[in-house]
Amino acid sequence: MRAYDIIRKKRDGGELSQTEIEFMVQGYTSNEIPDYQMAAWAMAVFLRGMNARETADLTMAMVRSGDQVDLSGIAGIKVDKHSTGGVGDTTTLVLAPLVAAAGAPVAKMSGRGLGHTGGTLDKFESIPGFRVELNKEEFIRNVNTVGAAVVGQTGNLAPADKKLYALRDVTATVDSIPLIASSIMSKKIAAGADAIVLDVKTGSGAFMKTLEDSFALARAMVAIGQEVGRKTVAVITDMDQPLGRAIGNALEVKEAIETLRGGGPSDLRELCLTLGAHMVTLAGKAANPAAARARLEELLQNGQALAKFKEMVAAQGGDPRVIDQPELLPQAQKVIPLLAEQDGYVARIEAEELGIAATMLGAGRETKESKVDLAVGLVVNKKVGEAVAAGEPLVWLHVNEERRLAEVMAKVKAAFTISCQQPAPATLIYGEVV
C-alpha cells in the first residue's frame, strides 16, 4: 500500500477503505508519511469530501493513534457535552453541577481559551484554589462521590488529530466538514464518553458562520456517533451575539452562580436547560427531554443545583465560600461604562469582536504563552432587541491594564449596531439533529 495511490484515489472521487484511512493516519503519526503527502491527502478530502462511513473510520483511526481514557470505574452512563466555541459560553459551569444534581455522572475534560473563545479551565481557575489537574484516581473518585468533575485533558489523546490540525491550519484545509467533525469527535470518544451532546454554534462569533454549514457539521458528527456506537445529539445554537451577558473568567463564574440560583440571563438558562435535558435523557435518568427539563428546572429552584456546585468546588480544592460570596472572586480595579451615543434599539452585536476585545483586556490568550487576567472582561448591558437611550451603558468594561483601553473601547463600540426600529427577537436555538 502506498500513500500516493490513496491520495490519487481520493483526488479522483473514490471511497477510501478503512484500511487505507488507517494506513494514512498511522503513517503520518509515526512520521513515515511526510507532511507534503498528508497535505495533498487533506486537500483531496477537502475537495472531494467523505461519506459517513469514511468519516467515522477517520475518527476512530485518530482515536487509536493515542491513549483512550477508561471511565469504566465510574458508575452509570457517562455523557459528555461539547461546544464548538463562542463568546460568553458559560454552559459547562452551569451544566456540570446541574446535570450531576439530576443523578447523571459528568466526567468532563475541558480546554483553555485561545483566540476570541474563552476556556472552561481558565474560568474554573478563577475560583481561588480550584484544581483542574487531578490524577485519574481523583477524577474517578470525584465523579463517583460528588457526581461531577471538570479537568484538563490528560494523557496523549488523539495525537494524530493534533498533528493533522496543525498541518490543515497552514494548508487551507481547515474548513472541511469531514475533517472538522472527525477532529472534534475523536477527542470526545478518546475521552471515554458513552454518549455525547453537541452544542454547535452558528453566526458571527462561531467557527461555523452560516446556518447551512452548522447543520452540515452537526449531521456529520451525529453520523459519526451512530457509526461508532455512541448516542449523539446535536443542538444548533446562536452565536451572532454573546451567550448571557458576561465575557471573562471570574465574571462568567459569577453569572453561572446567578443562573444556578434560579436567575441569570434568560438565554444562558434556556440553553443550559435544553442541553442538560438531552444529557440527563441520554444518561438514562429521565424518560424523555421534557421530563428531564422539568426535573432540571426544579433543581434550579430548590437550591440543589447550587449546592452541588459548592460540593464540586470544594472537592476540587476551590473555596466554596465564593458560591455565597461571589465578591471573593478576582475583581478588576476599574469598571468603565461604554455609553450609547443615540437612542434606539440594539439591532446587532458582533460577538467575535467582543470576544477579541475581552482578550485584548487580558481575559484570553492572544498567544499560547499569554498570561490570563482572571478578573477582567466585559459585561453586556444591552442585548439585541433591547431599547437603549443616549448616555446609557451598552457595556461595562472590567479593566486592570489601561494600555490598550482606547483601542478596546473603539472595537466594542464598533461591534454594536443601533437602529431606530426594534428588530425581531433573536433566535437562540435553530434546531436539533438526533
Image (tube, helix red, strand yellow):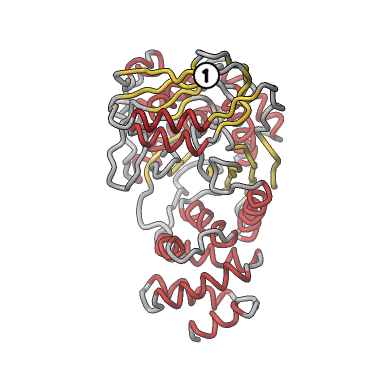
Q: At x 60% / y 31%, what residue is drawn?
A: 348
Front one among 13 and 432? 13
Give the answer, above or below, for where 391 lies relative to 256: above
Q: Which residue is mark 1?
A: 341
Front one among 146 and 402? 402
Give the answer, above or below, for where 287 lies relative to 54: above
198 vs 339, left or right, is right
- Percent across and percent down for residue 32 are 38, 79
SS at circle 1: loop
Front one among 73 and 27? 27
For disc 1, the neighbor class at 10 Å (few under 14, some 14 to 19, many from 20) is: some
- Percent across and percent down for residue 175 are 55, 58
- Percent across and percent down for residue 57 are 57, 67
Q: Residue furthest front?
A: 342
- Percent across and percent down for residue 282 are 63, 41
Q: Is residue 304 visible?
A: no
